[in-house]
Image: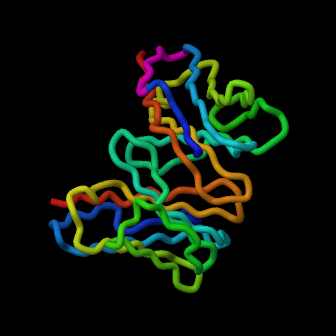
Amino acid sequence: DTGVSQNPRHKITKRGQNVTFRCDPISEHNRLYWYRQTLGQGPEFLTYFQNEAQLEKSRLLSDRFSAERPKGSFSTLEIQRTEQGDSAMYLCASSFRQDEQFFGPGTRLTVL
Amino acid sequence: AQSVTQPDIHITVSEGASLELRCNYSYGATPYLFWYVQSPGQGLQLLLKYFSGDTLVQGIKGFEAEFKRSQSSFNLRKPSVHWSDAAEYFCAVGHTGGFKTIFGAGTRLFVKA
């Protein structure tokens, strides 16, 4: 399968713990995006990478959030000191230049 | 600022009936426009896109959408709905030459037998 993959698919954690999600984009795609989706809403843009450079971060991305894309391949999204308000689906997408974005299945985070 | 409005939170149609999902956008230039579908437990799947050219766009699964600049709309249509079309549908606008895609809140489609 050459689609976008995300791991884990589900994560349950206690408030205050750190979590890390991984996204593997389609191999030839140089752009990678993270979105957050809460119940009843569309995805909200979080951040964007072109190759290994993080070029844009949304105001939604507080200091507790950090994303990396070493070597321009896979990406990780870390949330430190999780809060209940962080509970959401975290979606990763990739694209080649400015073509349409291909989305992964998402990681559902539940913070207790 | 860019924005996307999907006025209908949910819509119910009978199987075999026609469907139209509404989408209005706000954008200062010619936008890239998309419709995505999301089924439970599945990722977002692109149905169709409009970048330029013919304003009537054909997509997968028998869907089409029409870009109307004067109305700032990009409504999604299907002539005959199948039960498998029940899902959440998202309209989105992108920035030409940019990267950020803004999504609407979605319209959930229910199909009744």
Q: Is residue B12 magenta?
A: yes
Q: Which residues are magenta?
A: B9-16
Does residue B85 sit above or below A58 in this rendering?
above
- B39 relative to A94 in the view: left or right: left
Image color mode = rainbow
Near-viewer residue (A47 or B43) = A47
Residue farthest bottom in this picture: A71
Does residue B14 sit above or below B57 in this rendering?
above
- Quarter holding the C terminus of chain A is bottom left
- B103 relative to A76 in the view: left or right: right
Image point 77% across, 30% down: which residue?
B56
Residue A82: % across, % down: 23, 67
Which quadrant of the structure image shows residue A20? bottom left
- Quarter holding the N terminus of chain A is bottom right
Residue B4: % across, % down: 55, 38
Residue B33: % across, % down: 67, 42
